[in-house]
Amino acid sequence: MLGLMQEWPLLCHKIIDHAARQHGNREIVSRSVEGPIVRTTYRELRQRALKVAQMLERDGFVLGDRVATLAWNTARHVEAWFGIMGIGAVYHTLNPRLFPDQLAWIMNHAEDKAIFVDLTFVPLLEKIAPSVKSLKKVIVLTDAAHMPETSLPGAVAYEDWLAGADGDFAWRSFDENTAAGMCYTSGTTGDPKGVLYSHRSNVLHAMMAAMPDAMGISSRDSILPVVPMFHANAWGLGQSAPMIGAKLVMPGGKMDGASIYELLDTEKVTFTAAVPTVWLMLLQHLEETGKKLPYLKKVVIGGSACPRVITKKFQENFDVEVIHAWGMTEMSPLGTLGTMKPEYAGLTGDARLDIQEKQGYSPFGVEMKVTDDENRELPWDGKTFGRLKVRGPAIARAYYGGAGTEQFDTEGWFDTGDVAHIDPNGYMQITDRAKDVIKSGGEWISSIDIENLAVGHPDVAEAAVIGVAHPRWDERPLLIVVPKAGKEPSKDDILRFMNGKIAKWWMPDDVAFVSEIPHTATGKIQKTALRERFKAYALPTA
Ligand code: ADP
């Protein structure tokens, strides 16, 4: 027997309809790429998104067409997203930090037909566009006054293009399983792989993200997504913020400590999210200037493991709650969040920080397990680690074009490539990427734990740990350190600081000092580049 409830497909444009109707005057504040701060509302944003949809259709784009965006977080980027999805086309966020060759490869693979591009990235797109045969239309996200000279064929200024529409348009309707968005993983090994979100998965993910014990956001919040829309959908905030009617504050292209601080302060931001490196910059800015964070209540930190020192400083010096989160492009991206269940809610000080070093537990909509290499499920004892596998309605069941089939099994589990353990209360902790784990004498050493500890040293700005070949142990950990400006910590200093805080056999065999550590396009430490650079490194213990 079927239920007798209404058919109401979960389509993304219903989110912006709801925002315009229920929260129509709520502001979206952007640091524009042209410079000034600009303000709009959900009502206006929806109206402009309808014009985007109307113009795309007039230009001949239809259901299923991939429309790329190469842009910072601004209201224009959000309205482009909703406009694209509103005709059943697919927004495809491109990460401008990738190399031109990689971007061209990705655009060709996705067969992008049109692109919305920020002024900042016009020179970059000029390099790529000639090799993307599918590309028919370039829309530069600016007005006529700021439109640059460009070799991009037929490029139009967004505001001019939009002026061609009157907005008298109705969203197209289609099945909720229709593709809505696309994002490629950065592919540190092998080619990038395309993840194809559906309307249904985006809507469910936005609801899941907003729940009180997930991000816990509401219409009373002022939300600053520092995490870019091209980095796994700004962790869903581009959809969950309008869904619950929160004010949105968009940082544009400026993500340094001072610029972020300015927005946090003037826009009375209560909630923000970004990768750890952004917060290291902000905290440094706060320490240098003596400024405080009177409005900010919560910060979500993920993308790579959040060092304890960041959590401690936010909470103890600024009274801001840290939510450590883990996720992946393949998961829309949220997987787990470290909010406190009653079992842990009473903890304070170091005991609380211990729990917050874990990546947290999964909300409804994410199932997870850890297995050994034979796919046998491992106990949730908080120490036995293995491969982390997940499934749920906002998790990829395949990659676009059929790559990476080995990561999906017949029971619907996706192998994340992360190594983790889960404690009896369901809190998961990543110990490594499977390919970064250090294998010493047949046992595994977690590079993340050592890195987290090392960045707690007052003179250390950033730290990375890699395995280096060792004649007796196969591999031993080498700690690579970027000292803080003006500081010269010694190897002994650092090792003494770490001593007793991790198992003795996990202690790095040596410390190498460098001026910079390379990062991937999503802000993670590029271990492949470090392994290459230090592959002939002679450990003193060898
Ligand atoms: P990319 O590989 O393109 O950078 P993702 O942003 O999807 O794409 O990366 C997901 C990976 O980032 C996860 O599989 C995990 O290894 C790592 N990661 C994300 N959040 C955390 C976290 N809080 N702690 C440790 N690792 C994390």
Image (tube, rainbow, N blue to C red):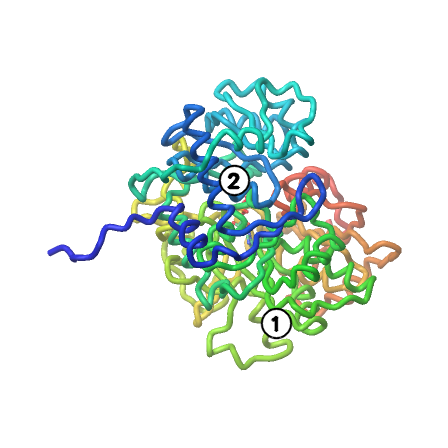
Q: Label 2 CB, ligand 1: below 8 Å?
A: yes
| Mark 2 surroundings: few (<14), some (14-19) or many (≥20) residues within 10 A | some
Between the C-alphas of marks 1 and 2, the distance is 30 Å
Query: What residue is drawn where x is 73% and y is 64%?
Result: 456
Closer to the camera, 390 or 156?
156
Return the residue nearer the eye: 387 or 515. 515
Q: Is residue 440 visible?
A: no
Give the secondary structure at mark 2: loop
* Residue annotated with mark 1: 353
Q: Split into 4 quadrants, where in the image is the N terminus?
A: bottom left
Q: In this view, does 202 lie to the left or right of 285?
A: left
Q: Residue at x 50, y 21 (%)?
A: 136
- Residue 80 is left or right of residue 488, and the answer is left
**Residue 484: x and y, percent?**
82, 56
Q: Which mark is residue 185?
A: 2
* Residue 274 screen position, x and y as percent: 61, 54
